[in-house]
Amino acid sequence: VIPPPVIHIESYNEDSISFTLKMNTNIKVSGYVVNIYWTFDTHRQEKRTLVIEGEKSVQKVANLTAHTPYEISAWAKTELGDSPLSFARVTTSGTRPASPSLKAKAINQTAVECNWTGPRNVVYGIFYATSFLELYRSPHNTTTTSHNITVIVNRDEQYLFLV
């Protein structure tokens, strides 16, 4: 039986998490697959995947958001097959940034100008869809470091936007 890996949170701050992975077994590990999950504005769950080759176990994940709960899941790839999943949860420190104030204005039938307020020197994600269900499951999205973007949409559709 292959045991799940042990995820140990080494440290965290407002924009990063450091953790180690180890296996309590003599089975040779060829690598790990790690998923980091967090929820965006209660509508959209985000995920970042790391594929770690070899037995290297110390990892640092950066560019995270302050005061946000993150869930880390991991499994090991071994000579006998994949291990079961293990989980760890941690909330980054600091104060969560205020939600941006978004204004969306149609320029024509296929272009929407989005403007928002918020801090400088950060990356913003813009998510849009024609329904709440699509916004939650599989929205169109783009990122930018500026405070405005023009989004191309389909004509004769109504859209919901989040930033």
Image (tube, rainbow, N blue to C red):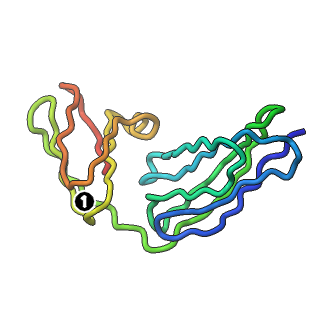
Please, which residue is most extreme toward the bottom here? 94
* Residue 24 x/y as whole percent: 85, 52
Q: Count neighbours of disc 1 (C-alpha within 10 A) and say few if under 14, some if 14 to 19, many if 20 or more.
A: few
Q: Is residue 20 above or below residue 143?
A: below
The residue that label 1 is drawn on is: 101
**Up/down of 57 relative to 95, above or below:** above
Query: Residue sitting at 34 percent across and 67 percent down?
Result: 98
Image x and y of residue 115, in percent: 18, 52
Residue 12, given in percent of the width and then of the height, sits at 56, 68
Q: Quadrant of the N terminus?
A: top right
- Answer left or right for 132 relative to 58: left
Measuring 48% from the left and 68% from the top, which residue is drawn there?
Answer: 67
- Looking at the rendered structure, the kind of residue marked 1 is Ser
Residue beneath the point at 31% across and 60% down: 122
Total labels drawn: 1
Viewed as shown, does residue 86 lie left or right of 136? right
Answer with left or right where residue 1 lies relative to residue 14. Answer: right
